[in-house]
């Protein structure tokens, strides 16, 4: 196959895979609700556990919502490769002539579309629960928009590494959560700063940089890990 | 890129086993000598600090331990990459047996740091940038150890571990700087963290001696652990049986 043809067919495989994964998630749409419900319930626990006082909740809001989003994103990783791994589809994908990293990226993108985007859309409601002002909610959504893809990308590496293991779930959190720390720091501080009326460009640029870095490197690492797990 | 044949020859488990057996006593003795020299100069000869008095002397354990925690992670990442690229078993092995030692040094750095923090900052724990990154480094070590323990096949465990270490190496600077940025944002000047003026030579020399001593200890202990692990992994080969028979005579 000549080079341009190869590229266009890889592009075709990329798009076909996204479509397929979206279709599959649509067929199992009940499962998509779970991480979202988890996200809402975790945030609801905080006023109950700490205090319903407005001042206190407002101070905690950026951190609490972001930690909940982090955990929800991590738990939702379970659906990323698992069913394909179990029925052998993943193995076929690895054997295909297309670059594995591109295919992994397609899977991550479709996974983010069905798990990350709902979290972003749910965030304003939780912002209201936690008495975030509108500026804070806007910043929260922006940081989630830039940050949740990073969580999916980095999480995909951890998921790929723990794929064939029996008790992979706990291990996944051990591997992935420390790597999520930079996203948490910049996002929560951006929301904090926006509530104080400060400029948040710096944090957003950092998140953007993290996104670019992880979109470039994470699929490669995840594809390598998948090969190790599938063998 | 091909490695010269001598590397493969040296790194074969059997040769590695015999060579390292000869190297261990050298490392061990030079470790003990530098340890006692460093401790003596650090604890008795070096002058007390003009600001912190005698309590600064914990630095002679704390700082080398913190250096080791990062050094060992780098050694692990490099040797795991070598194992991943050139498929050298011994390199994989070095990465996996280094991990508990690295985690122990990280833990030591955290404990001594917190003991040092009590007289200096008035509290055992401060969310200071360095302490926090050290804590995260400990989590990275523990994650690696847990991953190694979870995968039964040593070959797959080594390759998966190598990917994790490489991802970790890319992330460590990012985590470090984001934590630093976070702590300046949250705390600013509230922590009375002493600004280190350049250290006096009489304090610096024992510190460097201690750092060398810790490195020698690492070399000796990692080789011992590697030898044990080689025997375990190669237990079905003839040379291991011969070694065991000879040594049990």
Image (spheres, rainbow, N blue to C red):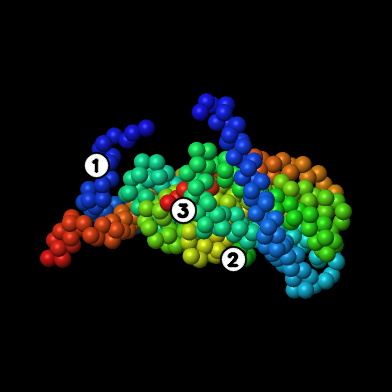
Q: Residue furthest left?
A: B249
Residue found 59% across the figure and 40% down from its top: A13
Residue B108 seen in the figure: no
Mark earlier in primary sequence (1, 2): 1
Instruction: State if disc 3 and disc 2 touch (CB < 8 Å).
Output: no
Total numbered labels: 3
Residue B219 spot, x, y in % from top left? 34, 52
Judging from the image, mark 2 belongs to the subunit labelled B
Q: Nearer the viewer, mark 2 or mark 3?
A: 3
Residue found 32% across the figure and 35% down from its top: B3
Q: Considering depth in this image, is B146 or B26 the residue closer to the camera?
A: B146
Residue found 50% across the figure and 38% down from its top: A97
Q: CA distance from mark 1 to mark 3?
A: 30 Å
Q: Considering depth in this image, is A75 or A85 the residue closer to the camera?
A: A85
Q: Which residue is mark 2?
A: B124
Q: Is residue B16 left or right of residue A175?
A: left
Q: CA distance from mark 1 to mark 2?
A: 50 Å
Q: Nearer the viewer, mark 1 or mark 3?
A: 3
Q: Which residue is mark 3?
A: A229
Q: Is residue B35 left or right of residue A6?
A: left
Element type at mark 1: helix
Residue A67 spot, x, y in % from top left? 69, 60
Q: Is residue B79 left or right of residue B143?
A: left
Q: CA distance from mark 2 to mark 3?
A: 42 Å
Q: Which residue is mark 1?
A: B9
Judging from the image, mark 3 belongs to the subunit labelled A
Residue A215 spot, x, y in % from top left? 62, 42
Q: Is residue B1 left or right of residue B239?
A: right
Badge 2 crowding class, 10 Å Cα cut-off, few under 14, some 14 to 19, many 20 or more, is some
Element type at mark 3: helix
């Amino acid at each position: 196959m000549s080079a341009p043809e190869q590229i266009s067919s890889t592009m075709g495989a990329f798009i076909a895979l996204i479509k397929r994964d979206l279709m599959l998630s649509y067929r199992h749409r009940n499962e998509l609700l779970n991480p979202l419900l988890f996200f809402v319930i975790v945030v609801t626990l905080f006023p109950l556990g700490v205090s319903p006082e407005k001042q206190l909740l407002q101070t905690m809001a950026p951190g609490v919502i972001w930690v909940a989003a982090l955990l929800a994103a991590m738990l939702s990783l379970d659906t990323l490769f698992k069913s394909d791994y179990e029925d052998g589809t993943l193995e076929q994908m690895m054997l295909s002539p297309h670059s594995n990293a591109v295919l992994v990226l397609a899977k991550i993108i479709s996974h983010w579309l069905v798990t990350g985007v709902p979290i972003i859309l749910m965030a304003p409601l939780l912002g209201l629960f936690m008495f975030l002002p509108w500026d804070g909610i806007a910043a929260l959504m922006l940081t989630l928009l830039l940050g949740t893809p990073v969580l999916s990308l980095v999480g995909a590496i951890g998921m790929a590494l723990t794929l064939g293991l029996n008790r992979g779930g706990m291990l996944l959190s051990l591997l992935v959560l420390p790597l999520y720390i930079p996203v948490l720091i910049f996002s929560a501080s951006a929301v904090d700063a926006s509530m104080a009326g400060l400029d948040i460009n710096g944090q957003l640029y950092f998140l953007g940089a993290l996104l670019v870095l992880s979109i470039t490197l994470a699929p490669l690492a995840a594809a390598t890990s998948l090969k190790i797990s599938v063998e | 890129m091909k490695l010269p044949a001598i590397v493969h020859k040296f790194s074969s488990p059997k040769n590695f086993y015999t060579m390292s057996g000869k190297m261990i006593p050298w490392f061990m003795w030079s470790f003990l000598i530098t340890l006692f020299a460093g401790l003596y100069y650090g604890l008795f000869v070096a002058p007390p600090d003009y600001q912190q008095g005698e309590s600064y002397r914990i630095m002679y354990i704390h700082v080398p331990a913190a250096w080791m925690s990062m050094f060992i992670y780098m050694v692990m990442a490099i040797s795991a990459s070598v194992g991943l690229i050139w498929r050298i078993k011994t390199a994989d092995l070095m990465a996996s047996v280094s991990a508990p030692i690295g985690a122990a040094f990280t833990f030591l750095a955290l404990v001594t740091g917190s003991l040092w923090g009590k007289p200096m900052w008035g509290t055992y724990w401060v969310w200071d940038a360095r302490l926090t990154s050290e804590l995260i480094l400990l989590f990275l070590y523990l994650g690696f150890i847990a991953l190694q323990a979870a995968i039964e096949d040593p070959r797959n465990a080594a390759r998966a571990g190598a990917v994790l270490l490489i991802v970790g190496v890319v992330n460590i600077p990012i985590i470090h700087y984001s934590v630093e940025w976070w702590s300046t944002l949250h705390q600013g000047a509230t922590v009375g963290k002493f600004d280190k003026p350049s250290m006096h030579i009489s304090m610096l020399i024992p510190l460097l001696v201690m750092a060398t001593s810790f490195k020698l200890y690492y070399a000796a202990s990692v080789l011992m652990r590697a030898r044990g692990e080689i025997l375990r992994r190669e237990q079905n080969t003839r040379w291991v049986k011969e070694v065991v028979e000879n040594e049990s005579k």
